[in-house]
Every structure is written in structure tokens, then in C-alpha cells.
Image (cartoon, helix red, strand yellow):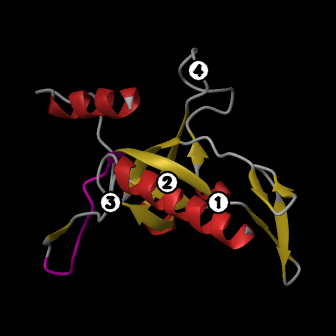
Amino acid sequence: MSFLNAFKKLNLQRQPLFRLIGDCILVEILETKEIKTKGIIIPTEFKKSVDGVFVDRPLFARVLLIGEGFYDEENQPVPLEVEMGDIVLIGQHAVRRISYFGPLVSSGTTVLGMIRESEIQMRFFGENAYKTAMSLLEEEKKENVK
């Protein structure tokens, strides 16, 4: 949560250093674990063919900063639906990584990227909602294995 807190503080400063435009969203890519089901291991990166088209596994990301949104036909602001701190599900290729030469921060494995709101496939309302959903899925998976 340190990056989220840092961007919240930046947002509250009297003179912001930068702002995101339109529906741009700054995200932190969350680590994904291998999925193990009935002896089958699905690695963190794979390609699956759907009707001859290869599809990458989606990613989970934490929303760190959001743009201002857009304006409708009457020039009224239309804010984005996501909020800072939400966990979102996005496609691997939807993310434009901030640095192609490794993470911006030299310590740890944090990877930052930019997405557009239209590229979000699912939204969890914060860290707790994400953890609750994942634990419920784990419980359901264990019950189905029995």
C-alpha cells in the first residue's frame, strides 16, 4: 500500500507535480500466483488458444491515480467509475508499463503501468473486497475438489 499512500499524498499537495488526462489510470501490477487445480498447474504466464486466437492470462492491478474523466455533449464532467485503491482485472496487453527497463523503484519488484478505464474488465471495491472474493473462490475450489 506504500505506493497508493504516496500518490494520495501527492494528490493532496497544493501544487500537484502532474495530472493524468482523460480516462488514463496509473496502476501497480499485483503479483499473481500459480493456480493449482486437481493436479494441473496453470503458470502465471500462459497463452490459450480461443478459436485460433491466442489470449494471455489477465492481470490484477491496484489503482494508484486516476484522470479527471471526460465531458459529455453538454460539456458536463463525466467522472471515472474507478477510485484510488480499487483492485481491477485487466488484460496483459492493456498495460503500458512505465519502464521497459525494469521497475521505476530500485528496491522490490513493483511494476507501474498506465491503462484506460475502458480496458478494465472487473472492479473490486478496494483491497478488502479483493481479498474476500479471492478467499471465497479458494473455499469454493476446495469444496469442489472433495
Q: Few, some or many C-alpha atoms within 10 Å of disc 1 (few <14, some 14-19, many ≥20)?
A: some
Number of marks in the rendered image? 4
Amino acid identity at mark 4: Gly
Write the start and end of the magenta stretch as one range: 65-74
Q: Amino acid at mark 2?
A: Ile
The residue depicted at 66 percent of the width and 55 percent of the height is: 92
Between marks 3 and 1, how big is the CA–CA gap? Answer: 18 Å
Amino acid type, mark 3: Val
Residue sitting at x 62%, y 61%: 91
Which residue sits furthest bottom?
51
Q: Residue at x 38, y 48 (%)?
A: 127
Q: 42 or 16, which lies in front?
A: 42
Q: Which mark is residue 58?
A: 1
**Rendered position, 48 above or below 12:** below
Residue identifier under label 3: 82
* Mark with earlier residue (2, 3): 3
x then y, percent, for residue 133: 46, 61
Q: Are marks 2 and 4 in contact (CB under 8 Å)?
A: no
Write down the residue under mark 4.
108
Which amino acid, by three-letter code, is at mark 1? Pro
Query: Which of the two labelled residues, at mark 3 and mark 1, occupies the earlier sequence position?
Result: 1
